[in-house]
Amino acid sequence: QVQLQESGPGLVNPSETLSLTCAVSAGSINNYYWTWIRQPPGKGLEWIGYIYYSGSTIYNPSLKSRVTISVDTSQNQFSLKLSSVTAADTAVYYCARLAHPYNSGWFFDYWGQGTLVTVSS
Amino acid sequence: QSVLTQPPSVSAAPGQKVTISCSGSSSNIGNNYVSWYQQLPGTAPKLLIYDNNERPSGIPDRFSGSKSGTSATLGITGLQTGDEADYYCGTWDISLSAYVFGTGTNVTVL
């Protein structure tokens, strides 16, 4: 059973860069898509973007100018950087595996437990 | 703001059935598979349904999914107190080039 674990600072100053890492265990990062999703307190889910193990990325247009997702296959992990953060970026950030089998749809089959990131000085 | 609309809440007595609708457009549900996620209080979402109506291993057949045109529906039969959670639909949106989630529906067991 694939397991994902987010890590990173729980508090970020406004205007700075939020950085999180997702470690993948009990499975290889190769040949899959990996994604970040966030959920502001008391609100719904928002997809941030995905990265293929080869390094190609697609970002949510609403966040594209501030987001960078990268992958380190040697460490079996991938990372998120979100720049110029404001209080509106306060949320629980989840990493997940994005499945897209042949002739099938897109869906998130494995999720991390999530990590709360608060933007405040 | 989500492009997929769900009712904010639904409720029913134990053992009864509820359905949750997810309304979209031709750029998302109309041309892509839909998945559904269950989020129990204080936990990460869990995949419930994928490809409109497929259940991952371990998901009971009390949960079912369907799609017609630009709308999708999640059904839960034999409602249990453990089903109290938020439920989200999701799919790829061709126009936005982004994955989109529904607004979410809270299920309450009376």
Image (cartoon, grey):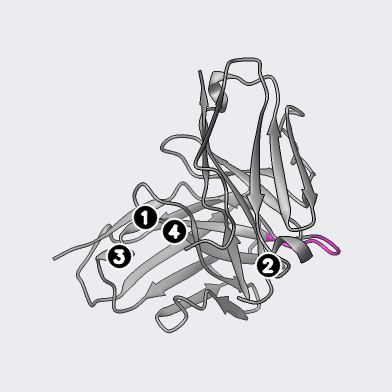
Q: Does the CB distance between marks 4 and 1 fall below 8 Å?
A: yes
Distance from disc 4 to disc 1, alpha carbons, whole Å, reads: 7 Å
Q: How many marks do you count on the picture?
A: 4
* A60 in magenta: no
Q: Does the CB distance between marks 4 and 3 fall below 8 Å?
A: no
Marks 4 & 1 on one chain: yes
Distance from disc 3 to disc 2, alpha carbons, whole Å, reads: 33 Å
* A100 in magenta: yes
Q: Name the residue under label 2.
A: A30
Q: Name the residue under label 4.
A: A38
Q: Quadrant of the N terminus of chain A?
A: top right
Q: Which amino acid does label 2 sit on?
A: Asn
Q: Nearer the viewer, mark 2 or mark 1?
A: 1
Q: Does the CB distance between marks 3 and 2 fall below 8 Å?
A: no
Distance from disc 3 to disc 1, alpha carbons, whole Å, reads: 8 Å
Q: Residues within 10 Å of mark 3 (few under 14, many from 20)?
A: few
Measuring from the top left, give residue B58's x and y in whole percent.
72, 33
Determine whether, in the image, residue B69 is placed left or right of residue A98.
Answer: right
At 49% across and 44% down in the image, what residue appears? B44
Q: Name above or below for residue A33 compared with residue B70.
A: below
Q: Does the CB distance between marks 2 and 4 fall below 8 Å?
A: no
Determine whether, in the image, residue A12 is placed left or right of residue B100.
Answer: left
At 30% across and 60% down in the image, what residue appears? A90
Magenta-tinted stretch = A99-104
Query: Which numbered disc flags the more N-terminal residue, 2 or 4?
Result: 2
Q: Quadrant of the C terminus of chain A?
A: bottom left
